[in-house]
Amino acid sequence: MDLSYGPEYDTFRSEVQTFLAANASAAPRGEGLRSPKMLSWQKRLIEHGYAARTIPKAYGGYGAAPDILQSRIIAEEFARAQISQGMGGQGISMLVPTLLEVGTEAQKEQFIRPTLLGEMLWCQGYSEPGAGSDLASLRTSAVLDGDEWVVNGQKIWTSTAHLADWIFCLVRTEPNAPKHKGISFLLFRMDTPGIEIRPLVDMTGNANFNEVFFTDVRVPKDQVVGRRGDGWLVANAILGHERDSLGNPDATLARFNALAELMKIETLNGQRLIDHPVYRDRLMTLQGRMMALRYNDLRVLSARLNQADASLARMITKLEGTELRHALEGLAIDIMGEFGLAYGDNPLKRDHGSWQYQYMYFLGLIIGGGTSQIQKNIISERGLGMPKEPKLDRAG
Amino acid sequence: MDLSYGPEYDTFRSEVQTFLAANASAAPRGEGLRSPKMLSWQKRLIEHGYAARTIPKAYGGYGAAPDILQSRIIAEEFARAQISQGMGGQGISMLVPTLLEVGTEAQKEQFIRPTLLGEMLWCQGYSEPGAGSDLASLRTSAVLDGDEWVVNGQKIWTSTAHLADWIFCLVRTEPNAPKHKGISFLLFRMDTPGIEIRPLVDMTGNANFNEVFFTDVRVPKDQVVGRRGDGWLVANAILGHERDSLGNPDATLARFNALAELMKIETLNGQRLIDHPVYRDRLMTLQGRMMALRYNDLRVLSARLNQADASLARMITKLEGTELRHALEGLAIDIMGEFGLAYGDNPLKRDHGSWQYQYMYFLGLIIGGGTSQIQKNIISERGLGMPKEPKLDRAG
Amino acid sequence: MEFGLSREQTLLTDSVARFLSKEAPLDRVRRFATEGDDRDIWAGLAELGVPALLVPESAGGVGLGCLDAALIAEQLGYRATPSPFLGTGVALPLAARWGGRIGDELLAAVAAGERRVGVALANAVGRRADATLSSAGGRLDGIVHFAMDAGADDYLVATDTGALYLVAADAPGLSIKAFDTIDRSRRTAELHFAGVTGSLVGDDPALVARLLDALRVMLAADTLGAAQQMLDQSVAYAKQREQFNRPIATFQAVKHMCADMAAALEPCRAMIWYAGHALDHMPDEAHLVACHTKAHVAEVGKAVAKTSTEVHGGMGFTDLVGLHYWFKRVGYNRQMLGTPEMMRLEAARAQGLAA
Amino acid sequence: MEFGLSREQTLLTDSVARFLSKEAPLDRVRRFATEGDDRDIWAGLAELGVPALLVPESAGGVGLGCLDAALIAEQLGYRATPSPFLGTGVALPLAARWGGRIGDELLAAVAAGERRVGVALANAVGRRADATLSSAGGRLDGIVHFAMDAGADDYLVATDTGALYLVAADAPGLSIKAFDTIDRSRRTAELHFAGVTGSLVGDDPALVARLLDALRVMLAADTLGAAQQMLDQSVAYAKQREQFNRPIATFQAVKHMCADMAAALEPCRAMIWYAGHALDHMPDEAHLVACHTKAHVAEVGKAVAKTSTEVHGGMGFTDLVGLHYWFKRVGYNRQMLGTPEMMRLEAARAQGLAA
């Protein structure tokens, strides 16, 4: 066990801190994705290697060798300084790695640099109303008509559809092939005629997602990534890449601390709620779970560094992390009694109503990105080596 | 809503109380099943209609019309007076109703009266090591050889095998029939050559059950109840009869009260454990669950009286009742700290070590008589109308 | 012995259920969420006798009992119905029945559905933040956060010490700030009192305590209805939704989630019946049962709300199916008038197990 | 940065695992349950250096750390191994390392596996019933219930005020009553002191507090091992057991029960590693982490013990497969030296969140 990062990383951390101190004023604070300040900040981050760090220089990245600890130090220091780490989004996190892996040279040239610079925003078109857990049953079709694909169908859970310039989209191009083999990975512009975007209001009251409808949307033939019919493999190639943990332990720690503070401030009949033994016991129970998950996360990080096996430890983080967050937000509501109900424009809200908002949002995350049931199937089959359910008579 | 039993039942209750007051000295207290005191008590109970109440006089019963409230009053008053309600056991509770329903006249004549009188003790041979949740897959075979069945195989969970005179047993008589159709319901003496009984020690340290092995056990041909091959139907005919609830709410209440007393007596650093807010909150949580189940039980009783529908309410009592008891016993262990571990001959045991014993025993009951998984299948399919799992390719 | 509903109770419940299903479906609830108007619904319920249910016959009411009211509350929860039932249909007539000074004229107007009464008892449950309400010489000063059934003509309010007053909404010195909670099927407001003249309904804290018990049972009954709705929708959705070439209702995980909900929820029905009955007929038990009912049904409701949303997958998270109206209704019922931890402590006190 | 086990730690763990799997399988544990003799096992562990692990090299030990000891504790839990590891292998050498007065001769004898030390700290955790132990002029009077690793040559005992003494098992005035607990893979006893002369190891309660933290982490590690065993057996049983013409491991309900166990248990492994490391290297965090580790792993262990038994169906309830040895081991670890509620209160205190 060695929980220090070592001297060479201490030096690197100093460099990051120096950069942040010198450049803080240039960082956007609440400015939008398209704002000049955000775009120039993104450019500066890439120049210094704090964004697009491992993307080759030839495509507009910084060109550094992958180093997990450096990435983590960057994330830690930016978070500590509360300074934007530049643009995120599915274009940078998902499409760019995909293109690097299976794109043609022309596609890499065309798409990666503007995506990294924030000049080209993307949304993702995977899920459909009828294809959620069973994503491979998707039905949005693309039929070749001369030099163009004609796309018809509907996508859902498209989070930045209203902002995006382009979409990367799974479509069925071979209707007679087995369900995993008839899918292609298609790129097209969101201003193409025939695309309708409807905001999808969710239980929080916000429209965090959209529905996107395609009616005879015409897409140039060469905008397929990978081979026609290989879309399932293309999409899964990046699902294997590192994704942000949905149960981010640092965010959970911040919420835990905020809850402990809240319990010191709020009172019931003059008694601070932290002094209410039953609420305090619930808080401590969650702290214990949280610590176990934090150390589990350290273990996963370390295993990636040292090529050790921690696959089961990694497999459970989404399931456990989202459940813990949901429970933590729920405790905050409970301790507040009636005040826990304040929402919307209610001036009695505590912490901007974030407890109720996150309580619902994390229920969404428990479901999204693979429901708990799908997670448990994966844990039992891949983690514990248990058999799959037997195939059914009529299964396709 | 009318929670009183009504005046005619008040009269009946007085009669029971009068009987108990007058006869208390004749009741066995700890004497064994075969003791003269138990046998004469059983006889007296039947004569007064407090045992075998609804069994026809012709077969040795009291011959009263079924009346659920009378039965409940008898149970309540005997329990209150802590006086034995006579002999229980699977012969009286399961075999006698079965014989009344599908037995031949000769079988009724031969078996019912001595069973009621406690002169003929029975055990049940249903489960097998390979046939638990899937009971119909049982493999103990009975092959006709002349005028006799030759039985080979093994039964398990046979609770009074070492005491019983006879067994009622499910055996496979038609090996080539579909699995539910090849079973027969067979009666035979436990002193027949070829029967070996092995006590089955369980996690409590006791042998509450047995394994029974059959090697060429020869049984007269006419000792089948119902038709040959109809054993599954015969066995299920009585499974539909009222059974004692495994999550007996009166017993749960008694345990709850005992736990509350324990928490008033035991201390930690001089503080009574009932004054420990977190333990008290757990106790209150269980009391709330318990009350809900008690009222649910009242509803089920009332529905039987008034032919109202409460099938879902009834379906969940085993699942919820056993889980509640297990949790209640577990809380008692928790509050006692190290003292909760005392067992066996340890003089530090509280309440005769019953908390640890019941904690384990009720885990056994959660599993026994249909695991929680089977219970949930039943609730979802019969209670909520959800479909069965699709048949598998190779399912028989 | 009959532990169950009478024919009359079944008929009443069915008539309310039919009305709500026809006249107050989810779309109507959605309209309330933006417009805040439930007058047509309350008028319809008044025709069925709902506001008159607990009003004595002598004052033009039906003179039924708390169990009947709980059955109505369950139906309102089942449809997430906006209505001033808790204050108008329950709190006011019970205050009168249990010895509070309420004029027959007001009772008659309430019974006819012509006048609405909100209810603001939070300060008698437990003071939070700057909540405080005191009376001196019949004049009220202070704040009650979270009055229920806001938008009423009058409010029943409890002081910190458990005295009960009736105050007209337009009384000088009273300011009413309507505000948002998560539950947009209800109207909630903050009441500020600056020397407001109220009419004393009763100064024995036992009256407020008894009203609180009744309202807690009603909130629990509302949760029972809401959770039953969520379970019903889960079963229906699971039967119709296909993934991996089969209805998800055939997956054992989904079936067991539904079974878990049913197993926890079904005993709550008997508990509500018993608690409603006890309020009228079993004074020794009523308080303990009400506390446990409020706490237990809230816990079950919370679990059902989460599980049901999960059974619906992403759809459960959206506004499209509107399942969240019930999720939030259950949340509201849990937080108001005593959280589960507070209720369990109160239950312990009622048995001498806590100071 | 390396959050994981070193090559040496893996080798050590593997050697102990191999030894236990070969020389101390379940049948050997059963024999201990009736005969109470674990000398051969301890001798074998001594050959592998287990009792010497934490003993300083200067006293003939190996001088390793608490994480190493926790890894051993996990292996002992995995096989439900009878052994005097907690008192002899952990408490005594740590008492010496952390400034207690322990003679090098005793340490050397312990390291060689020739002398056993039991540990009786319950009174410093919380007094129950008539438990009390006081010292005056080096003479001890009172009772400690539930001494661990009974059958030892010496006992480390804590007074109510947290002073630590070493007492010979045959000291005049000391009577030792061995007795049953549910866990028959351990030896437990009650110690009665009547003017017993003990040797003062340390009178600063901080030493006992630190020892308690270490022992709590060891108990948690034992539970991790025991629960892992139960999970492994569940998966293996489910794959082999057929009902309804298929292995029960193909039923989603059974799979999800196993997934639930794994999801709860796997983070406990990292928690034990961290807690073990903290005992030696992070004095500011060690106490808080030890409290939470004891509580959290106990809760997870309890759930795994129940679920695993259920996956085994009736067989899990019998003595035939012997799963209950681990069920009880988990139960023992939960109750000793601080229940989860006590530990969480202690964790709150450690952060200034409780008085």
Image (cartoon, coloured by chain):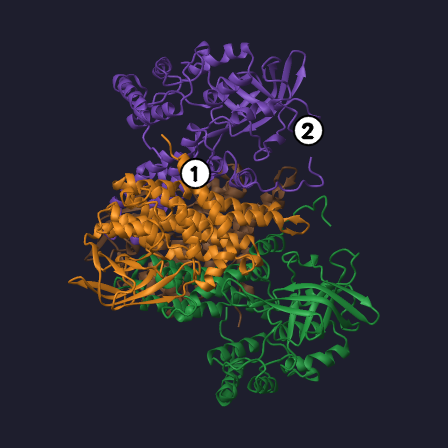
Chain colours: A purple, B green, C brown, D orange
Mark 1–mark 2 distance (CA, rounded to whole Å): 46 Å
> Which amino acid, mark 1?
Thr
Label 1 and label 2 in one chain: no
Q: Nearer the viewer, residue C5 or B203?
A: B203
Q: Where residue C241 sits: x, y (%)?
A: 61, 40
Q: Is residue A194 left or right of residue C159?
A: right
Residue A178, picture quadrant = top right
Q: Where residue B151 sits: x, y (%)?
A: 74, 66
Residue in the picture at 63% in, 69% down: B197
- Residue placed under numbered mark 1 in the picture: D10
Q: Is residue A42 left or right of residue A154?
A: left
D297 up-or-down from A225: above or below: below
Quadrant location of the C terminus of chain A in the rendered image: top right
Q: Is residue A163 left or right of residue B317?
A: left
Tell which tag, 1 or 2, sits nearer the viewer. Answer: 1
Label 2: state its secondary structure: loop
Q: Is residue A55 left or right of residue A192?
A: left
Residue D139, picture quadrant = bottom left
- Residue placed under numbered mark 2 in the picture: A178
> Which amino acid, mark 2?
Pro
Quadrant location of the N terminus of chain A in the rendered image: top left
